Amino acid sequence: MPEQTVRTPPEVDRVAASRAAVEARRKRAEVKNNIATGTVSALTVLDDAFADPEGVAGRMRATDFLLSVPAIGRTKLTRILEDLKISPSKRLGGLGPNQRLRIRDFIADRESKNRQHKRSRLIVLAGPTAVGKGTVATHIRENYPDVLLSVSATTRSPRPGEVEGINYFFVNDEEFDRLIENGELLEHATVHNASRYGTPRGPIDEALNRGDSVLLEIDIQGARQVREAMPEATLVFLLPPSWDELVRRLVGRGTEGAEERERRLETARHELAAQDEFDYRVVNGTVADAAQEVVDLIQTRGARPRRTV
Ligand SMILES: Nc1ncnc2c1ncn2[C@@H]1O[C@H](COP(=O)(O)OP(=O)(O)OP(=O)(O)O)[C@@H](O)[C@H]1O
Ligand SMILES: Nc1nc2c(ncn2[C@@H]2O[C@H](COP(=O)(O)O)[C@@H](O)[C@H]2O)c(=O)[nH]1
């Protein structure tokens, strides 16, 4: 009996292909989610991609892969892809030998740093004046209720709208001296050659003992002291997209006169030179992205953005 040839109508082929594409996308989304939640190591995904370029990981775009790695947002992505000399549209399985080496080294380095800081629930956010530390910290306080924002003591006067106990504890010089003498401050410094600022130790110890995560928004001198006192802390340096944008933000805030602005910008030049002392650098392009990157660096048990309606 002659063999019967079954012809598949083109329409059936198209449906099957489209189902296969949907399934492949679902699997890639699952892998991305697993990387983002730490269920699978990004390094393992890379190795899978290189071993099977046509498999689920191999078909994943380098852009999607990198964006699923915690603390890599769109702003950072552009710089990383440039450094790795990888075009955004490239799939992992299609990377050349040198690109594979570079992306693998990059991911291995990040994962090793993460392991070193695995147990850290204390994160220090520092950076030059007007880069947006306060704005990013406020966004975290309002949107990530799992993260406790430390409230500093300061000898400077409240600005309009600032609230005692929310923005700062406003104290006079004598009270500040007393806090230091009683060992109540984890760190303290005179900032911009003007007022004194310090981090109350008690609430931080209590939060860490409870297993909660704490964010300190302080200057660089303070960050260095915290590193000495608590080496397990994660230090994050917030960067402006450019120097001109930093100046624009400082002027736009309108809270300092010309002389004070000059003084702060002079300090900012020195502070920017200290960025390599930090564990991570985050560019404050948009507030929400920068805040998300910072939160991703905190080893929270379940920090999730507050749901908005
Ligand atoms: N991502 C952003 N894009 C545009 N403007 C921003 C961004 N982040 C903050 N700003 C603005 O920049 C100005 C400075 O921000 P902020 O006061 O938070 O800086 P800061 O780093 O806390 O400064 P300082 O160290 O002097 O207290 C504010 O006017 C704020 O609204
Ligand atoms: N070392 C510390 N620095 C602190 C603390 N709290 C705030 N700061 C830093 O001070 C400047 C100026 O703040 P502003 O509110 O007067 O504009 C800013 O860089 C803050 O990060 C602290 O407890 N310790």
Image (cartoon, rainbow, N blue to C red):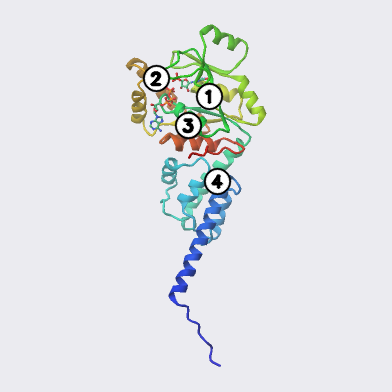
Alpha-carbon neighbours of circle 3 within 10 Å: few (<14), some, or many (≥20)?
A: some
- Across and down, in percent, residue 112 comes to 59, 41
Measured along the vertical axis of the image, is residue 144 above or below residue 83? Answer: above
- Across and down, in percent, residue 80 comes to 44, 43
Q: Which residue is mark 3?
A: 139
Q: Which residue is mark 4?
A: 36
Label 2 C-beta lies within 8 Å of the nearest ligand 1 atom: yes
Alpha-carbon neighbours of circle 2 within 10 Å: few (<14), some, or many (≥20)?
A: some
Residue type marked 4: Ala
Q: Are marks 2 and 3 in contact (CB under 8 Å)?
A: no
Q: Earlier in the sequence, mark 2 or mark 4?
A: 4
Distance from label 1 to label 4 (Cα)?
28 Å
Measured along the vertical axis of the image, is residue 220 above or below residue 57? Answer: above
Q: Are marks 2 and 4 in contact (CB under 8 Å)?
A: no
Residue type marked 1: Ala
Label 3 C-beta lies within 8 Å of the nearest ligand 1 atom: no
Q: Which residue is mark 2?
A: 264
Q: Can residue 89 be spotted in the picture?
A: yes
- Across and down, in percent, residue 295 comes to 53, 35
Q: Which residue is mark 1?
A: 223
Q: Nearer the viewer, mark 2 or mark 4?
A: 4
- Across and down, in percent, residue 225 comes to 56, 21
Q: Earlier in the sequence, mark 1 or mark 2?
A: 1
Q: Earlier in the sequence, mark 2 or mark 3?
A: 3
